[in-house]
Image (tube, grey):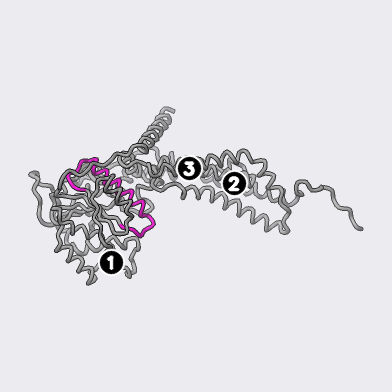
Amino acid sequence: METRLGFSWRILVVLTAILAGIECGAVAEKPRGKRRHAYASMMYMGTPRDYEFFVATRVMMRSLSKLRVDADLVVIASIDVPSRWLRALKEEDGVKVVRVENLRNPYEKQDNFNSRFKLTLNKLYAWSLVAYDRVVMLDSDNIFLQRTDELFQCGQFCAVFINPCIFHTGLFVLQPSIDVFNNMLHELEIGRENPDGADQGFLASYFPDLLDRPMFHPPANGSKLDGFYRLPLGYQMDASYYYLKLRWSIPCGPNSVITFPSAPWLKPWYWWSWPVLPLGLSWHEQRRKSLGYNSELLVMLIQSAMYLAILAVTRLVRPSLTKLCYNRKPEKSIALLHASLKVAGIWSIMAAYTVPFFLVPRTVHPVLGWSLYLLGSAALTSIVINVFLLPGLSVLTPWLGILGSLFVMAWPWYSDGVVRALAVFAYAFCCAPFVWGALMKILGSLQTLVEREAFFPRLGESTELPNKLY
């Protein structure tokens, strides 16, 4: 009991902290004078997730500012990025914006080309930032645990091998050079080999012998190195390493940066990323402490009010809905009515659990996102229960199952990821009979409804049998 109370108390503390973060997002520091180094990222348009990456870029830049890095914060933005987004980056986040034309991707016709990587070659513009001695180029899905300014001591090109044979371009160090930049553009024109058609494949082809280079160790005197180096794994800790042990144990270099090279829908800024993926909460904690959630607050309040109104209305008008169900004429084909009603009932239940998921703002905090989803699904299932006269507990069994699974996944005291996965599997196995039983009860209720409508006359009609004519 004490353990459960302690866990509930932690959830309440998180909720309170989120609400505080909604009201006050920290303002990024203004840059102090001219700096010789820069942390840079890029933004472009043309994907269904442009806004989410914009939010992720802001959170990363603000987290770097809070770490008081001794470098400029730069965003390389294509000319089609909305001006209001760029204004927010410059005025609210203290970021320097460099506007560029999109580089044409000559690899679009490759069989393995993924269209979401079409404009990632814009990352090559980092070599044109010649106002800086060194640039750390970043993807927006990085979480910084501590300052990494020692990276500016690295050589002309340095990257991390999270794959045994291919370095990762989510973070790399470069020395800007117009000559190198122009040569890269020339290589694009002549169609240099590119295994994936994106920045990853091009840079791996452009720096083919990086695997044979020495490991980077920052000189104690602060001097800069020349040449090419491999970066320790601690600068790009793949989130999948964490999920196995539920803790970091990277022996190579400082454990400084977490990266999420996963499927787009499993990026940490989505509200459903936690507790499905334990590290999702880490990213949202950085956002809560830096950017806040003001942009989603109004939408969440409107949806919450709408769902509460639905719950109240369905509670009050239940008798009228019940009468409506009995006021239909008998169908000519009982079998057709039976099948149609079952299909309509099952699809309505599925819609009640699916629609609220897509209405929740994608980048809201997971605790608020799941709370809004559960409220929305409860509201819509109440409509289904009333319209089809279904047993409430049976329809809400998946709702209770989802709630329970969230607690199972969020339990903070698993010894490792294997135990956690087994616990989730065991929970699903135990829930399956209850879900099946609920489905059978729902189908039985729909069958009863069909029989009532088929064999009972409409309300208000005479129940007398007609006289025989013979």
Q: Is residue 460 left or right of residue 64?
A: right
Where does the image place residue 261, in percent across and percent down from the top left? 31, 53
Q: Earlier in the sequence, mark 3 or mark 1?
A: 1
**Residue 123, quarter of picture:** bottom left
Residue lying furthest bottom in this view?
A: 190
Residue at which label 3 appears: 302
Amino acid on which the number 3 mark rests in the picture: Ile
* Cα gap from disc 2 to disc 3, whole angstroms: 22 Å
Whether 298 is among the magenta residues is: no
Label 1 residue SS: loop
Residue sitting at the far top = 2
Residue 52 in magenta stretch = yes
> Do tag 2 and tag 3 residues touch (Cβ < 8 Å)?
no
Q: Which residue is mark 1?
A: 104
Residue 258 visible, this angle = no
Image: 7 above or below 400: above
- Place of residue 410 in the rendered image (x, y in percent of width and height, measured from the top left): 40, 39
- Point out the frontmost of discs 2 and 3: 3
